[in-house]
Amino acid sequence: MSRAARLLDLLQAFRRYKRPVSGAALADELGVSLRTIYRDIEALKAQGAAIDGEAGVGFVLKPGFMLPPLMFSEDEIEALVLGSRWVAEQADQPLGAAARNALAKIAAVLPDDLKAGLDDSALLVVPRARPTAGESELPLIRDAVRSSRKLTIDYADVNGAASRRTIWPIALAFFDRTRVIVAWCELRKDFRHFRADRIVSLTLEPMRYPQRRAALMKQWQAREGGHLGAPRDDCASAARAGPQRS
């Protein structure tokens, strides 16, 4: 185990204790010597960790401390690399750029022995052959989801029938070839799934929708069993009952 990983494990161990814990207990939990624990505690203090206590009495980490260079294990780094690469290749351009920037920020604070894992990762994402239809509207849709604001959309269903809807977007799902908005539809008074590539035009309304997005999300998940299956048109719905007030 690298020293960085060992310090991360010690930091995580401290966070599990609300009261002072002895060095011996920490050494037993992490499978290292007591001398190593004392040395690693001093290393964390040198990095700015507010650790109170002393040998024979116990140690406690004050809340609020984050240690950026040691926040991730090697598996977590690979997960971040794969996720960032997927977003960079599969999401809309602004979100892809944000993924690249985030990965660069992570690389800037990682110690050398972990930073190498960013460049050496063998987990690859195959680029898309062409942009997904309706991709230009995704930043506006994401903004609506984040701010819990209504969208007015002109929509064409699978048969080409056009309609105007006011929806409450609660999630945006990324499939290989399409993007799907999960929303409450005011016209149908039910949850609906709208394919982004079938939206002819949309307007972000100034008003927020009247329910909490988290509460709507829980109701939709309960109906869908927690999963969004293959992309479906807006004609599909989970139930006819209205959303519960929270």
Image (tube, rainbow, N blue to C red):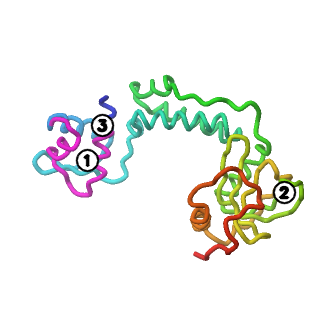
Nearest the eye: 20 or 233: 233
Where residue 133 appears, as percent x and y from the top left, is 79, 42
The amino acid type of the residue labelled 2 equals Tyr
Report the disc number at residue 108: none
For the view shown, which residue lies furthest in the left direction?
56
Label 3, label 1: how far apart the Cα atoms are: 13 Å
Label 3, label 2: how far apart the Cα atoms are: 54 Å
The amino acid type of the residue labelled 1 equals Ile
Direction from residue 156 to residue 235 in the image, left or right? left
Secondary element type, mark 2: strand
Place residue 216 in its image quadrant.
bottom right
Q: Which residue is mark 3?
A: 7
Where residue 91 appears, as percent x and y from the top left, is 67, 40
Check if residue 198 falls in the magenta segment: no
Check if residue 16 falls in the magenta segment: yes
In this view, 85 is above or below 225: above
The crowding category of the residue bearing disc 2, from other C-alpha atoms within 10 Å (few below 14, some 14 to 19, many at least 20), is many
Q: Earlier in the sequence, mark 3 or mark 2?
A: 3
The answer to whether the residues at label 3 and label 2 have Cβ atoms under 8 Å apart is no
Which residue shows up at 16% across the image and 50% down it? 58
Direction from residue 233 to residue 82 in the image, left or right? left
User: What span is in magenta?
Assistant: 6-33
Q: Which residue is mark 2?
A: 155
Secondary element type, mark 1: strand
The crowding category of the residue bearing disc 1, from other C-alpha atoms within 10 Å (few below 14, some 14 to 19, many at least 20), is some
Q: Which residue is mark 1?
A: 51
Which residue shows up at 48% across the image and 31% down it? 108
